[in-house]
Each structure stands twice: as C-alpha cells, then as structure tokens.
C-alpha cells in the first residue's frame, strides 16, 4: 500500500555536462548537483545517481518516482540555483499519494521545465 | 522473472496537439497516432493511452516500458511518418531484456528524438 508519506526516489543524472565541456566526471554539473543534494535534508527521499537520463539537451535532470505514483522528469536544473526548488518539489511530491501535485503547489521551475511524465505502472 | 520476449508496454500520449490548434479530442494528433498503432501488428506489446505525458513541446510522444527494463520516452512523432519506426523500436525494445537496445539497432528517429530515459525501479 502506498501512503502519502511513504518513501519516494529522486533520480539524479550525474553525467550531465549542462552544455559545458567535459572537465572530468567528478566535476560534471550533474555530479555536482547530486553531491549538493546529498548535503541537504530530504526526509523520506532516497537519492539515486543515474548515468545519463538522455535529456542532455535540457540538463541537468532529475526525476521523482515512487510505487503507485506518476513519475516526473524535470530539466534545466542547476546546483547553485535550484537546490531549494528540488527540495520543495520533492517534499510536495512525497505528500501526494499518487505523485500528482496540484499545479499551484509546484515550484515555478518545475511548472516550466517538466520534461515528461509517466503514469504509475500499477494503474494501467 | 523478466524474459527477452515478455510483454512490454507502449504508452501513447493521446491528447497531444502536435503544435496544432484544438480540433477536438478525437482528432488530436496524439489520438490519431494511438488509433493508427491499434491497426498494426505489435506482438507482445500492450498499447496504453495516457492523457498528457507533459512533453507538449516535442509531441507526439510515446514511451516504452516493462518490468525490469529501462523506460524510454520518444518525441516528435507523427502518425503518418513514424508508424514503422515505432513498430521497429518497440520490437527491438521487447527483444532486449533490460530495455537497453544497442545504438545501431535503434530506429534513426529514436536515436535522435529520445526525450528521456528512466532506469528500472528494481535496479536501484
């Protein structure tokens, strides 16, 4: 059974170059974003690194998913500018049992930079 | 257990306007794409309509997913031009137990118009 406050997963594309040159995997913007997210408090959110989520044209990229929930993919993210956005969005997502966060409760960046969404496998 | 030839799912965004005006839900390009796909042979592929996959800027949109497989989202699709592409891509996806189709075996449109991909939930 999925409850409103069950664990959710935040996938982070760690190999994203964010349109920059390749200064080595450790310094890639995607990896820096993941490292920054590991330093903040995200109760009930498991952070999972992913090697390329194939949204290279609009990285950095994260996705939120959980059992019984819609999966949402967000792009055009930056470790310096959007940590708070990601934290707020992840908390709102966790509070929505089906992953469908009301429009007005989504961070503005999430509203404008949703790359795609996928329905829960259980619903289809 | 996931086998190479197990059932996979083809999600189709049925509300996609493909940059056109709204001539009613039945005539939307996304719905026409789904109707066209229902007319072709797709062994082992379940077609699932989805009301908006939030890839509106690059529709029409489909996604391929299955238990234990990576999920792939493809865009810029057209019912007239890309039926064969989708059929070929879905068959290759079904033949790959983890959903990872070798680059050269992917239809060209799929190579150039992958919107995003998500790892299998079971792997993380």
Image: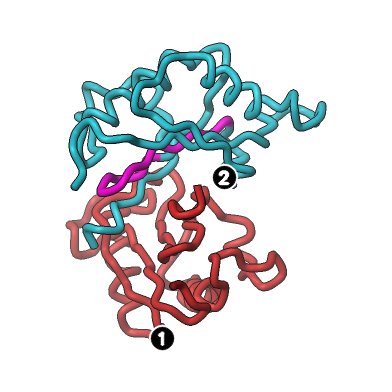
Chain colours: A cyan, B red
Residue at the spot 48% in from the left edge and 32% down from the top edge: A47
Q: Which residue is nearer to you in this view: B123 or A32? A: B123
B45 is higher (above) or lower (below) than B124? below
Answer whether residue A67 is magenta in the image: yes
Q: Secondary structure beneath disc 2?
A: loop
Q: Quadrant of residue A65?
A: top left
Whether pointer 1 and pointer 2 mark residues with C-beta atoms closer than 8 Å, the reply is no
**Residue annotated with mark 2:** A53
Q: Which mark is residue B43?
A: 1
Q: Quadrant of residue A23?
A: top right
Residue at the spot 74% in from the left edge and 23% down from the top edge: A27
For the magenta stretch, what is the residue range?
A: A60-72
Residue at the spot 29% in from the left edge and 45% down from the top edge: A70
Residues tagged by mark 1 and mark 2 found on one chain of the structure: no
Answer left or right for B30 relative to B103.
left
Badge 1: how crowded within 10 Å, few (<14), some, or many (20+)? few
Chain to which the residue tagged by mark 1 belongs: B
Q: Position of residue A8 (x, y in %)?
A: 35, 36
């Amino acid at each position: 059974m999925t409850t409103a406050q069950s664990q959710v997963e935040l996938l982070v594309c760690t190999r994203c170059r964010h349109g920059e040159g390749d200064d080595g995997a450790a310094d890639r913007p995607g990896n820096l974003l993941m490292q920054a997210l590991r330093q903040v408090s995200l109760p009930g959110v498991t952070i999972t690194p992913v090697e390329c989520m194939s949204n290279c044209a609009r990285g950095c990229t994260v996705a939120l998913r959980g059992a019984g929930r819609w999966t949402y993919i967000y792009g055009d993210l930056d470790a310096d500018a959007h940590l708070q956005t990601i934290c707020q969005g992840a908390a709102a997502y966790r509070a929505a049992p089906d992953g469908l966060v009301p429009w007005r409760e989504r961070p503005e960046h999430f509203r404008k930079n949703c790359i795609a969404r996928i329905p829960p496998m259980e619903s289809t």
